[in-house]
DNA sequence: CGGATATTTGACCGATTGGTAAACATTACA
DNA sequence: TGTAATGTTTACCAATCGGTCAAATATCCG
């Protein structure tokens, strides 16, 4: 009889590695659109191209699938903020942070929506991560920003709300993509909208934070 | 036998008015958290404090419930943008638009989340409204902003992305409320965070748009 | 009051849900 | 090559899903 994966201690097989990848890819498709409750294992199985019991051989529950997905996404999602360098100069750091976040919104919209869905539902599966690792990282970067303000490199402002505003403006292009496209109309819905957004947002934040004005 | 509500032509009774209100209130609670697919009629019935067949007496399907809710929310949600006055001066208009949107995020977070859920799912129920009335309204206001830029009242910028950035930054405090609270920590999670956000955002946009710099 | 109309409910339906059991097929490896 | 471990599938389960129906009850109005 096959031993359920989660109870196994040996290292993972090649097939395990591949199939788990296929499943998580399919799960991302489904969860990112319908959220946890609104998604069904059958849906994910169909997208993954395998039978439902086969999915459940690799992930014992729907919850386990979601958990694995969230864990993976959460890490890469914070990469841009981690790259935010205290020793760089404010203008280039802010600019490249905005660019990086916009690139993620463009290249990984499903990941952004998965996260947004989780937030809308009150973060029932990740609240601990928010209060722990996320808060710590933001606290650290907020301190950097505060120090820049202290020496006059940027205008005085609340660093937490600054971070929130960069998050929200950039993720908007992934999470509200339909709305953005609808409002811009067909002619401006090409990939060029990300370049337009980058230009606009960089100027907004650089000028809005009083950078380069000295 | 009772005639299904939707087929009736007579005016609504007092009870109808009251019960439909109770139902939509409960539906808002549930739909705004779990989205359309993730919500169940039983859940809504329980929150509303009435039996499932009774709900279905007033709204014949789950879809009808959602539809009625979306229609109501969509109208009031655009109120602040409609109030955006072409004859006002840029600074006060931008400031009060931000304030109004933040107040809505504070006072009607469920409505914001309902809308966000719909967007994340690709707006299957409201895409027409986005391409029609919403786009028209935004086009109109974008023209106002463009004219301000033309006469030098504000810096040149893409008016559409400007509107997106005000939407996203303000709605963030409703849609990502859990995250905002988690990051700010208990001590800064009181209602004061909306005042802090307003101060920060007003400065960001006023300075970022080059208003008052002349 | 009484009858017409409006409202509410319990019992129920077929479809779908997350998940299981066990037979069967395939792979890895000695 | 043989066989033990791994991987896959068919058939199935109880619970829940959206929704119906007819009977029971409450309300309105003359």
Image: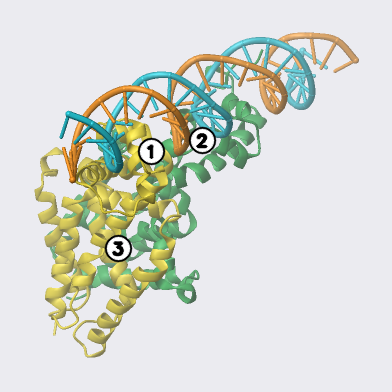
Chain colours: A green, B yellow, C cyan, D orange
Quadrant in the picture for residue A119: top left
- Residue B34 versus residue B119 in the image, above or below: above
Label 3: few (<14), some (14–19) or many (≥20) C-alpha neighbours in 10 Å: many
* Viewer-nearest residue: B177 or B126: B126
- Residue A119 versus residue B70 in the image, above or below: above
Label disc, if present, on residue A181 of the rendered structure: none
Residue at 37%, 43% (x, y): give it.
B3
Considering the numbered disc 3 on the image, is that residue within a helix, a strand or a loop?
helix
Q: Is residue A6 left or right of residue C27?
A: left
- Where residue A180 sits in the image (x, y, percent)? 40, 65
Q: CA distance from mark 2 to mark 3?
A: 40 Å
Considering the numbered disc 1 on the image, is that residue within a helix, a strand or a loop?
loop
First along the sequence among labels 2 and 3:
2
Question: Which residue, given by chain and number where applicable, does mark 3 sit on?
Answer: A94
Disc 2 sits on a residue from what chain? A
* Viewer-nearest residue: D14 or A91: D14
Foreground tag (3 vs 1): 1
Question: Which residue, given by chain and number where applicable, does mark 2 sit on?
Answer: A40
Question: Which residue, given by chain and number where applicable, does mark 1 sit on?
Answer: B39
Q: Quadrant of the C terminus of chain A?
A: bottom left
């Amino acid at each position: 009889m096959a031993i359920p994966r989660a109870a196994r201690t040996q290292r993972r097989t090649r097939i395990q590695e591949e199939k788990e990848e296929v499943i998580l890819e399919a799960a991302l498709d489904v969860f990112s659109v319908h959220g946890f409750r609104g998604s069904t294992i059958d849906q994910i199985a169909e997208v993954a191209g395998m039978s439902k019991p086969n999915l459940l051989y690799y992930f014992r529950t729907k919850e386990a699938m979601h958990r694995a997905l969230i864990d993976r996404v959460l890490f890469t999602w914070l990469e841009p903020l981690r790259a935010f360098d205290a020793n760089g100069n404010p203008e280039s750091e802010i600019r490249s942070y905005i660019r990086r976040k916009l690139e993620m919104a463009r290249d990984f919209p499903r990941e952004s929506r998965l996260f947004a869905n989780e937030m809308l539902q009150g973060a029932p599966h990740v609240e601990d991560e928010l209060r722990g690792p996320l808060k710590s990282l933001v606290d650290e970067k907020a301190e950097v920003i505060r120090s820049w303000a202290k020496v006059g490199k940027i205008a005085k402002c609340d660093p937490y709300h600054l971070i929130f505003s960069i998050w929200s403006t950039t993720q908007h292009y992934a999470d509200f993509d339909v709305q953005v496209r609808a409002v811009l109309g067909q002619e401006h819905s090409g990939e060029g909208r990300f370049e337009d957004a980058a230009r606009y947002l960089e100027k907004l934040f650089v000028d809005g934070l009083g950078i380069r004005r000295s």
